[in-house]
Image (cartoon, rainbow, N blue to C red):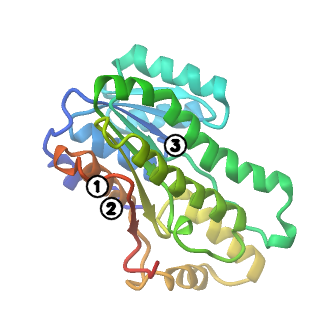
Amino acid sequence: MSTNTSANANTPNTLDGKHAVVTGGGSGIGAAIARVLVNAGARVTIIGRDAVKLDAQRKELGGSDAIHCAAADVSQADEVEKAFASACAAFGPIDVLINNAGQAQAAPFGKTDLGLWQRMLDVNLTGTFLCTQAVLPAMIERGFGRIVNVASTAGQIGYPYVTAYCAAKHGVIGLTRALALEIATTGVTVNAVCPGYTETPLLQESLDQVIAKTGRSADDARAALQRSNPQRRFIEPDEVAHTVLWLLMPESRSITGQSISISGGEVM
């Protein structure tokens, strides 16, 4: 996985004084977003289920005083409430929310039981709902806020064998569009970024499933997934992170309700 830290080190301090919360911040896209935001001057709270992984990520960022960790399952309302209270106690009011926590699991529709269906909705969609509710009233009261939901190209088109995941990510985009219109005059923007297959631990889990179920080699499995991207490559986490950073800029205040594809030109 490429981290491109040298490029991030040159990011101007455009988020000085801002407090950002990144869910699923312990690895993958969430970790890349946290790194970019810290380098842009923000104080960042990273939230995830694994406290050990969160602390490791904080240390990877130099043990910075600009990083606070809060362990929580974003699908559980009581845990979300405690985590966001901890964030506010550490760094004050929350200016930016990145709803990145997510989970993907593949199964044919006929073998998608209620448990799998509910898991995909709970983490990907209900988690986004709960975390947004935790920050939105204060953002509206202050007249400023940026909410970015990390959805997926699966929220823009359909893919076989991931019906539940696609349904959840379509729901995230629907929430994004509806909420953006509802609060358009408040100074708060709501957008979604939609990465294609991205070099993350979640992608490796998908590759392992393909290898186990089809008997393909690792190289063949990677090539099969890369074919969905016209550039024939996987997206790097930093590419997603810098798109998120762009949406947080003052110059992006007119951009709201959008679902921005980061997919090498994949037809939506």
Residue 159 to residue 126: above or below: below
| Residue bearing mark 2 | 239
Q: Nearer the viewer, residue 82 or 251?
A: 251
Category of crowding for the residue at label 2, using alpha-carbon neighbours closer than 10 angstroms: few (below 14), some (14–19), many (at least 20): some
Q: Residue at x 64, y 83 (%)?
A: 217
Identify residue for label 1: 242
Between marks 2 and 3, how big is the CA–CA gap? 17 Å
The answer to whether marks 1 and 2 mark residues whose Cβ atoms lie closer than 8 Å is yes
Point out residue 128 in the picture as x, y percentages from the top left corner.
55, 42
- Which numbered disc flags the more N-terminal residue, 3 or 1? 3
Dot 3: few (<14), some (14–19), or many (≥20) neighbours within 10 Å?
many
Residue 24 x %, y %: 52, 43
Q: Quadrant of the N terminus?
A: bottom left
Asked whether, in this view, residue 254 is left or right of residue 45, the answer is left
Instruction: Give, as a three-letter code, the residue at label 1.
Output: His
Kind of residue sitting beneath label 3? Gly
Q: How far is the residue under mark 1 from the one under mark 2?
A: 5 Å
- Is 4 on the left or on the right of 220, as rendered? left
- Res. 28 in view: no
Q: Give the alpha-carbon distance from disc 3 to disc 1, as whole Å.
A: 17 Å
Residue ID at (54%, 37%): 53
